[in-house]
Amino acid sequence: QVQLVESGGGLVQAGDSLRLSCAASGRTFSRYIMAWFRQAPGKERKFVANINWSGDNSYYVDSVKGRFTISRDNAKNTVYLQMNSLKPEDTAVYYCAAATVGGSYDNWGQGTQVTVSS
């Protein structure tokens, strides 16, 4: 198990940038695939991006490709989501999640709110 704490959310205008951080506890952080999900009001939680243990392979949902970048620093037990050119439709609670290789995302943070005004 790993405990996750997100930070960095806030209220911004369309076109602005934000960087979310997710700090993980435990010594085995580097073993986990890390991901970001988001949940807009009244909608289901959806996948945004993930990154492998070494940080050299990542995957994004089409709607954020070219605007968002996921990265990780295993020395700091932290994963980041750099969000550029934000749009109102990016408004959501953003969650950090962790999964072991071949496993499911069963470690979740409490979420951080991102609100993008038009």
Image (tube, rainbow, N blue to C red):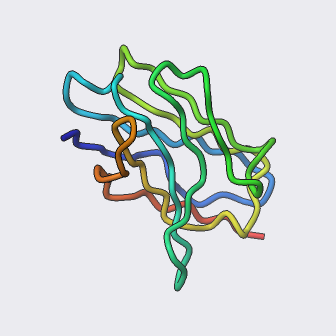
**Residue 58 in the image: above or below residue 68:** above
The C terminus sits in image quarter: bottom right
Q: Position of residue 14 (x, y in %)?
A: 78, 60
Q: Nearer the viewer, residue 69 or 32?
A: 32
Q: Nearer the viewer, residue 28 or 8?
A: 28
- Residue farthest along the front direction in this orientation: 102
- 40 left or right of 97? right
- Residue farthest along the top direction in this orientation: 75
How many discs appear?
0
Residue 24, quarter of picture? top left
Query: Could you tell me which residue is drawn at 56 percent across and 57 percent down?
Result: 47
Q: Nearer the viewer, residue 58 or 71?
A: 58
Q: Position of residue 94 (x, y in %)?
A: 49, 58
- 43 left or right of 88? left
Query: Could you tell me which residue is drawn at 19 percent across and 28 percent down?
Result: 26
Q: Position of residue 8 (x, y in %)?
A: 48, 45
The N terminus sits in image quarter: top left
- 1 left or right of 87? left
Query: Could you tell me which residue is drawn at 29 percent across and 49 percent down?
Result: 107
Residue 40, quarter of picture? bottom right
Query: Could you tell me which residue is drawn at 76 percent across and 58 percent down?
Result: 63
